[in-house]
Amino acid sequence: LVSPLVLFFMGLGEVQQGRAAIARVVELADLEQEEDDGRTAIAGHPRAGAPAVEFRDVGFRYEGAATPAVDGVSFTLPATGVTAVVGPSGAGKSTVFQLVERFMAPDQGSVRLLGQDAGDVSLAQWRSRIALVEQDCPLMRGTLRENLVYACPDADDEQVRDAVRAAHLEDVVAALPDGLDTRLGEAGVGLSGGQRQRLAVARALLTRPSVLLLDEATSQLDSDSERALRETVTSLGDRCQVITVAHRMSTAMSADHILVMEGGRLRAQGPHARLMDDDELYRRLADQQLSPVALAG
Ligand code: ATP
């Protein structure tokens, strides 16, 4: 139960935020317990070779909203690879993420993870297969190593080194005065936004997720950080299915698959070259870039 929940601490470093975070985790634990009590059926192991994530005609409307935030959306994403979700503001990108995480259930259709329907898998088991890296990833007070293994305290040195490599953090670690044992956060060394997000990626990887949801930072990154983050995302696609809300065209362009959303609907999907030919909105978003705001909405 604890392992997926501690991921909610990711990015919650400040002591003041700590209390609110703990309250939220306790609340979620209660919710999870409640749901799992009524849903003891756990459908064994995921099907080998099953798609990582499948949406089948999914619809969802927020309470009181006039129109659905997600409407009749269907897609299938394989076990590995990088998928970029793009579209203007309010298109439904974040809602898709929240449905994958099961923060809410669809009003229509079904969401499947590793070939299993949400109704057949407990929330704890479901969440243990997903890692979320949010846009803003403040540091926790403590060493870099402590920041990394927070969600996975049993990780050994080799696993930590592997996660650092995969998140393209090796140079960052090498430049710190005490390497992995350097103190970060308040009264310690600071990291840039891009570095913090890669740190959060390394932390997420230690939990060996099947699906990694990454809300790419909208803040301006310097070109080195931007390239490092893009390379990180690309190489993660060999390990799991990475779904990213892409606020940069460069991320979308290097993704294996792109979902183009507009007004809650999935208006087109495919690789960059095909969408440039086939989809007018995608072409417009691409042309407007390289301004990150234009793509993110
Ligand atoms: P952005 O790029 O601005 O983050 P988005 O593509 O992620 O947008 P969503 O946040 O998924 O879009 O929102 C889809 C629609 O649902 C929008 O019309 C939005 O106003 C609405 N919406 C989102 N969250 C809520 C909520 N908690 N309650 C009511 N409506 C919401």
Image: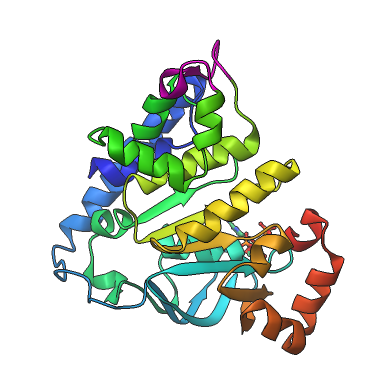
Residue 190 vs residue 171, the one in the foreground: 171
Colour pattern of the rendering: rainbow
Query: Is residue 155 found left or right of 296 in the rendered image?
Result: left
**Is residue 273 shown left or right of residue 214?**
right
Q: Residue at x 37, y 56 (%)?
A: 130
Q: Nearer the viewer, residue 179 or 197?
A: 179
Count of marks overlaid on the render: 0
In which of the image's four quarters is ligand 1 placed? bottom right
- Where residue 166 sits in the image (x, y, percent)? 45, 48
Where is residue 17 shown, x and y percent of the image? 50, 26
Is residue 118 toward the left or the right of residue 237 in the image? left
Does the magenta stretch mainly form a helix, a strand or a loop?
loop
* Most foreground residue, 69 or 161: 161
Which residue is located at x 65 percent, y 74 percent?
261
Residue 2: x and y in percent read 25, 40
Closer to the camera in the image, 202 or 94? 202
* Extreme residue toward the bottom, this view: 278
Can residue 220 be seen at all in this image of the molecule? no
Q: Left or right of 227: which side holds 24? A: left
Q: Image point 53% across, 42% down: which residue?
A: 198
Q: Is residue 211 magenta?
A: no
Where residue 44 sits in the image (x, y, percent)? 14, 69
The outermost residue toward the top is 187
Q: Vertically, is 22 above or below 125?
A: above
Q: The N terminus appears in which quarter of the rendering? A: top left
Magenta region, residue range:
176-189
Q: Is residue 42 visible?
A: yes
Q: Is residue 178 magenta?
A: yes
**Which image quadrant: the C terminus?**
bottom right
> Residue shown at 24%/57% (left/top)?
125
